Amino acid sequence: MKVVKRIDEVRAAVRQARQEGKRIGFVPTMGYLHEGHLSLIDRAREMTDYVVMSIFVNPLQFGPNEDYDRYPRDLERDERMARQRGVDLLFAPDVAEMYPEPIKTTVHVADLSAPLCGASRPGHFDGVATVVLKLFHIVQPDYAFFGLKDAQQVAVVSRMVRDLNVPVTIVPCPIVREADGLAMSSRNVYLSPEERRQATVLYESLQWAKEAVATGLRDWEALKRGVRERIAQKPLAEIDYVDVLAYPDLVPPRGVPGEQVLIAVAVRFGRTRLIDNALVTLE
Amino acid sequence: MKVVKRIDEVRAAVRQARQEGKRIGFVPTMGYLHEGHLSLIDRAREMTDYVVMSIFVNPLQFGPNEDYDRYPRDLERDERMARQRGVDLLFAPDVAEMYPEPIKTTVHVADLSAPLCGASRPGHFDGVATVVLKLFHIVQPDYAFFGLKDAQQVAVVSRMVRDLNVPVTIVPCPIVREADGLAMSSRNVYLSPEERRQATVLYESLQWAKEAVATGLRDWEALKRGVRERIAQKPLAEIDYVDVLAYPDLVPPRGVPGEQVLIAVAVRFGRTRLIDNALVTLE
């Protein structure tokens, strides 16, 4: 595995791989890798011949009162894990390489950026769309792999790619969970032992919701109420949002057969904000 | 010259050219070609091996009360001129090919989109940036050629390319003028004979301004006043703006040696809005 910090080094390495006839796979991350990220590498290795991973904690997608400064970082450990899992090229730029001057250009995806995390984190998805597009232009991959834990991010990026004719195929990948159901997240390390125990309520309430939909519930307000009530049973849980939307358009579901419905939650435990979701296809 | 209407046809043709080791040049236009456009083809042929021209009147960059519907179009004539001048691939999509569904993604270049034509035409440069980025993703050129008559457009697109790491080099090309100095524009056909005669005042007043700066004038308000007074002598001329800004940042000039200064004007003659400018480097 080659590790580079500069954009021109990425371009040179990818150009070479492409000249060898290889398909390029790309896994953008903010590092502090876990099994969720590693599963994206696996998928990229299945579908492509040369796997590029980026590790960049993007200041643009953090709000002023968010956890940019304390976001967990451990590049040495990440390098080891990426190498072991079969990444070919690791791109770990510093902020000055990605933003050598104040960026004036913003990519905004209307409607899809507004609800859910977009409402709690104003500007977040503009920051995501903008940095992802920058990374696409730097790496120029054939396929890019994103985890569905950030289902809204997948929706926003996919729409941007379609709207702007970006020559890349987005591959959404399933959520990876701990044994007790908690979705893998770099932010899980923030949790105290007691918070960590109570955090399983996200998965449990989503499981209940999936089951309720499977057995015919179509009253979305009642569904949200049920999820809220379950989460509220944990004293350390502070609900940010619980929502039910059609996927990937993120509009109120019509409730028709074949429709994909996203049940999404964001919950704070102390200073830690966790998200999780379930996607169900209506019968 | 190959003429195509579909995105996948452009991609296939460019892929083939690239496999033959050719450098790709791109000239985006709204058609109704004149010598200004044709000079871009010449430059593209000098610098690259495969010249793609697009002809697309982009609805996204026209305001609701602007001339989208009556913008002049003559694809047959354009095809003839492009073929004769040495274009290899002409891409002339219809609106449904470029916007198969309502576009939700907007590219916005802050500050640079605000003054001059950005002030007179709200949203114009978002529409320009967005469609140009789409076209870049479709054609994937090595070089793209833009005329400096739209100096602000060159500034906006260049900044977008730098901010988003778009893998293309922007080549700004000089303004081409009629014998009497009027800058070439597809919109010149709108002018009545009398308007056409009076329209030379744009060039004449800019020539005066260049001369004034060359001989030491650094009072920008006085410079603007001088340009305004000259234009106002033509009874059919209605000034939209006269401005003097540092280029390409479009901020007030500091007046220091080596600084590039843009003197830009927009003037209406009846229903026709013309723009022109002069770029001077301060001594």
Image (tube, coloured by chain):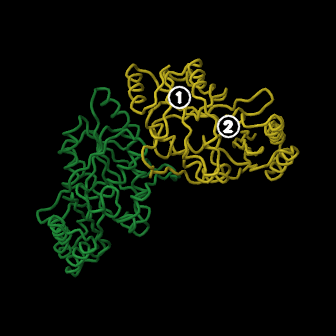
Chain colours: A yellow, B green
Determine which residue is flagged by label 1. A53
Could you tell whether B52 is left or right of B46 in the image? right
Could you tell whether A201 is left or right of A271 in the image? right
- Chain bearing tag 2 is A
Check the image and name the residue furthest to the right. Answer: A233
Query: Residue at (55%, 32%) from the top-left corner?
Result: A55
Q: Amino acid at mark 1?
A: Met
Secondary structure type for disc 1:
strand
Q: Amino acid at mark 2?
A: Lys
Contact between labelled residues 1 and 2, with CB atoms less than 8 Å apart: no
- In this view of the protein, which residue sits in the foreground, B160 or A99? A99
The Cα–Cα distance between marks 2 and 1, rounded to whole angstroms, is: 18 Å
- In this view of the protein, which residue sits in the foreground, A112 or B186? A112
Q: Which label number is shown at residue A149?
A: 2
Q: Residue B278 location in percent, x, y?
A: 22, 62
Is B269 placed above or below A249 here? below
Using the rendered image, report if marks 2 and 1 lie on a common chain. yes
Q: Which label number is shown at residue B109?
A: none
Question: Looking at the image, is mark 2 or mark 1 nearer the viewer?
Answer: 1
